[in-house]
Image (tube, rainbow, N blue to C red):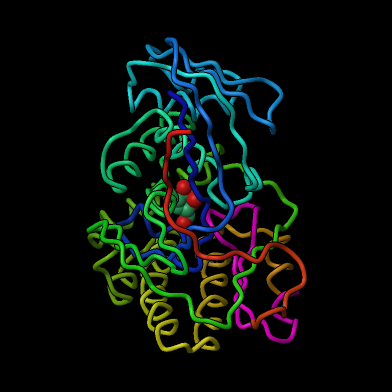
């Protein structure tokens, strides 16, 4: 049996560092992604990637995905640990996503591998299994946004995800607007402790004022520690911006949506402190171009990409992306 599985990457329009606090996010599954073609056989998963020197060779019985080498094979191993297929396979990985750029390349790999290994379950179950795989592989306590966007994408739509209920509501992208992704040139790595530190700070703030999803600015004002107060203020303000942005898209208020993106970037820069000089400069440069409604860093930050909302053709660099359907597999 030979299977071809494709999983899209995602660009997050707004709502970063909110998923792991049960907040709101608004990603778009994009028309770039990762395809795994796998001939099912044997008791190992052997994958060759055009972007990697060494193949991934993963034993079906493995017990510690994080110990596997080469590093990219850890994501394959994390999925094998979750799916526990009875049969392995030999195949290839191909992607047109930039790696480590904030477009969820690792989530796309996980979701495609899981489907190639005949994962059975709903898109939400697929996403949660792949989130656990990512955590086991990388040691980073990531949220579920990337995997859920890849699994549950809807063509032509952004996805409003409530990370408390895990409800996904498609929000159509208006006609006549470009979503453009521009790389800052700075490769992002999440494996440092910065992401885990931010998550721990959000938990510390929540232990003082209750779940950040339900908190208001008056609650944030009671936090004495200035760093924790800033982190909480980002999350509380970002949740409000995501809801307002979804309304702005529905009402085709692109100027309003763009202004919210700029506020989001400033909040990620000053309150959450996950931006970099390269990202800040790129946002400023894009905002100076006529026809750009808004721009912000997308994903975890610490490098990677900026997303801009613009009039058609206004941005002549980067990648123009479209809202794509969710991951799928077929026999070939
Ligand atoms: C990474 C994580 C996501 C999310 C974003 C920040 O992409 O994998 O779960 O936390 O960072 O919004």
| Residue 309 visible within the image | yes
- Give the x, y percent position of residue 30: 53, 58
| Residue 198 visible within the image | no
On screen, residue 111 above or below 79:
below
- Give the x, y percent position of residue 87: 37, 16
Identity of the residue drawn at 36% across and 23% down = 81
Q: Quadrant of residue 207?
A: bottom left
- Give the x, y percent position of residue 163: 30, 58
Number of marks in the image? 0
- Residue 171 lies left or right of residue 33; in this view the side is left
Identity of the residue drawn at 61% across and 60% down = 275
- Give the x, y percent position of residue 84: 33, 21
Please tell me whether residue 287 belongs to the stretch shown in magenta. Answer: yes
On screen, residue 79 above or below 260:
above
Instruction: Check the picture and name the quadrant holding the N terminus.
Output: top left
Q: Quadrant of residue 270?
A: bottom right
Identity of the residue drawn at 43% across and 47% down = 327
Please tell me whether residue 302 belongs to the stretch shown in magenta. Answer: yes
- Residue 192 lies left or right of residue 77; in this view the side is right
Identity of the residue drawn at 65% across and 83% down = 311
- Residue 297 lies left or right of residue 6; in this view the side is right
Segment colored magenta: 285-310
On screen, residue 223 above or below 186:
below
Q: Quadrant of residue 189?
A: top right
């Amino acid at each position: 049996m030979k299977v071809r599985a494709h999983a899209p990457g995602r660009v997050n329009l707004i709502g970063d560092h909110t998923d792991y606090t049960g907040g709101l996010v608004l990603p778009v599954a994009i028309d770039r992604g990762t395809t795994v073609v796998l001939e099912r056989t044997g008791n190992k998963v052997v994958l060759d990637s055009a972007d990697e020197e060494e193949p991934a060779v993963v034993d079906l019985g493995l017990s510690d995905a994080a110990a596997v080498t080469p590093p990219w094979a850890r994501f394959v191993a994390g999925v094998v640990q979750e799916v526990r297929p009875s049969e392995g396979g030999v195949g290839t990985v191909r992607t047109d996503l930039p790696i480590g750029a904030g477009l969820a390349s690792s989530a796309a790999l996980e979701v495609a591998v899981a489907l190639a290994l005949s994962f059975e379950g709903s898109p939400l179950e697929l996403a949660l299994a792949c989130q656990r795989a990512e955590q086991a592989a990388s040691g980073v306590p990531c949220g579920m946004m990337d995997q859920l966007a890849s699994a549950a994408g809807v063509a032509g739509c952004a996805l409003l995800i409530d990370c408390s209920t895990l409800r996904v509501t498609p929000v159509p992208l208006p006609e006549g607007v470009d979503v453009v992704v521009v790389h800052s040139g700075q490769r992002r790595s999440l494996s440092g402790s910065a992401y885990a530190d931010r998550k721990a700070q959000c938990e510390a703030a929540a232990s003082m004022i209750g779940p950040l999803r339900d908190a208001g600015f008056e609650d944030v004002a009671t936090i004495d520690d200035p760093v924790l107060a800033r982190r909480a203020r980002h999350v509380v303000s970002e949740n409000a911006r995501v809801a307002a942005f979804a309304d702005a898209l529905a009402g085709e208020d692109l100027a309003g949506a763009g202004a919210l993106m700029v506020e989001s970037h400033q909040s990620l820069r000053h309150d959450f402190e996950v931006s970099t000089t390269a990202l800040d400069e790129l946002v400023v440069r894009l905002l100076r171009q006529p026809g750009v409604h808004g721009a912000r860093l997308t994903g975890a930050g610490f490098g990677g990409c900026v997303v801009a909302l613009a009039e058609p053709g206004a941005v002549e660099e980067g990648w123009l992306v479209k809202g794509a359907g969710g991951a799928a597999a077929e026999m070939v």
